[in-house]
Amino acid sequence: MFTTPASRIVQTPISSLIGEDRMDGAGTFSRVELQQGIDLMVWEGDLASPITFDVHDDWHRINFSCALAGKSQFSTLDQRQNRTYQLDGGMSCISHTPDCRGQTSYAGRLESLFVSIDPGLLANLAPDMPDALRKELESGRCYLQGQAAAELSATAQAMVRALQKARMRGDDLLAGHSRLWMQGQALVLASLAMEAFGEERVAEDFSLDEMRKLRRARDMLLADLTQAPTIAMLAAETGLPIMKVKRGFRRMFDESVYGLFQRERMGEARRRLEADTPVMLVASDLGYTNASHFAAAFRKQFGIAPSALKRRK
């Protein structure tokens, strides 16, 4: 796998490339199934010359990758889209290319980590995924790359180092608490990658200072769930124009100002109801003077009345 010269391109389904751990003079490939539908893969090596594969994505997973070192390139070769993507050390990528055929090349000192998640499982794990990202993934030709944030890189490095230490000691990486830790880190990395995608899109329209002010506006909005401040108050407190507050909430948080407030308010209501707090007390604590208004808002959010939720417990 690692010694194929660049001039000799081998037709290879991705499922066969990742089917087993490999090790030779050029590097090491390790794959660990963290749970059904989530796999961790690490590729490490020192490539004396570039290697190239002609690949077919028959695995259909969504991949969250972080290139810690080395250079890689992926070119799509099909009728739907022909593009070339470059991923260098220090960059991250979200990709989903089911049934795509293309070429992938690697060069240099290689250290890359991949968290691969089944699309159906990811939909359950991240039901509030930004619509823009969902559409990209559903297109079937998603390859979103960018500079890896410090936290994402640190998470990837910690996972790679843990795998290296387990390999050196001959330990079972998935024994005891190690499995839970690695599963958690994999989900953290995927979450950070999705968050970075959203922030990159917002950065097209908003400066770093404006994004900081929008986060402050969100914190102010949610500081007291009994009553929302007006948009004019948020604008005045943060120094942003009213229209920028409105547009910024939709771009950064995928909600209108009051949509976000109501979602968090009803989420808190549900948590209290599930903790056996009486319906009337929950309504009162969250600023409702009329229990029927609270019930209507709760039903609109969750499709069930507060009293029915408590009876179902």
Image: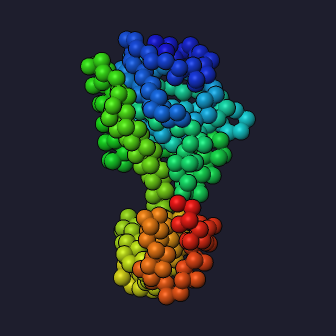
Q: Where is residue 256 drawn, in percent x and y?
A: 54, 73
Q: Residue at 35% across / 28% down in the picture?
A: 175
Scheme of image coloration: rainbow
Q: Where is residue 120 drawn, in percent x and y?
A: 60, 43
Toward the viewer: 180 or 275?
275
The correct choice, above or below, for 126 with respect to 293 in the image is above
Residue 143 occupies quadrant: top right
Query: How many numbered dots are placed on residues in this image?
Result: 0
Tell me if residue 87 can be seen.
Answer: no
Left/right placement of residue 212 relative to residue 101 reads left
Q: Residue at 30% across / 18% down in the picture?
A: 170
Q: Where is residue 129 drawn, in percent x and y?
A: 54, 54
Q: Residue at 60% across / 29% down in the picture?
A: 59
Q: Where is residue 3 drawn, in percent x and y?
A: 46, 12
Tell me if residue 40 can be seen.
Answer: yes
The correct choice, above or below, for 50 with respect to 307 in the image is above
Q: Residue furthest right?
A: 79
Residue 239 occupies quadrant: bottom left
Toward the viewer: 88 or 311?
311
Q: Residue furthest bottom?
A: 289
Toward the viewer: 82 or 164?
164
Toward the viewer: 239 or 118?
118
The correct choice, above or below, for 232 with respect to 120 in the image is below
